[in-house]
Amino acid sequence: MIKQTPDGIVVNLKISPNAKKNEIIKDGDIIKVKITAQPIDGKANKALVEYLSKNFKIPKTSIKILKGETSKDKTVLFETTDAEKLSNITKTFES
């Protein structure tokens, strides 16, 4: 699910830690993000934020995990008002 808010875009993601490579996969209505880091001591969450930051060229401080700190199902907020970046995020997750 992707939802536009006054702060930016909220996206529901399913995380797969311990993957061979970092990647975003669209599987029907589910958006999966594979992360190479292990889910130990928040390493996978940190790697997720770093990967999304590099992928969408948004500062790490503008990506917040709203729900699911200790779960594979996460709700992530991309805090940006840049129309081009918002469009890029939306296109990536909806295609």
Image (tube, grey):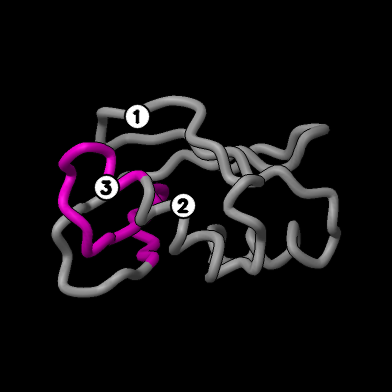
Check disc 1 and report its element: helix, strand or loop.
loop
The residue sitting at 77% across, 49% down in the picture is 80
Dots 1, 3 in contact, CB < 8 A: no
Give the distance between the C-alpha atoms of the residues marked 2 and 3, in whole angstroms. 10 Å
| 44 is higher (above) or lower (below) than 93 | above
| Residue 33 picture location, percent across and down | 34, 57
Q: Amino acid at mark 1?
A: Glu
Q: Residues within 10 Å of mark 1 (few under 14, many from 20)?
A: few
Q: Amino acid at mark 3?
A: Lys
| 4 is higher (above) or lower (below) than 66 | below
The residue sitting at 55% across, 37% down in the picture is 64
Give the distance between the C-alpha atoms of the residues marked 1 and 2, in whole angstroms. 12 Å
Specify whether residue 1 is in view: no
| Residue 45 picture location, percent across and down | 35, 44
Mark closer to the observer (1, 3):
3
Q: Is residue 2 magenta?
A: no
**Which residue carries the number 1 mark?**
69
Q: Which residues are magenta?
A: 24-45
| Quarter the C terminus occupies | bottom right
Identify the mark at residue 43; answer none if there is no mark.
3
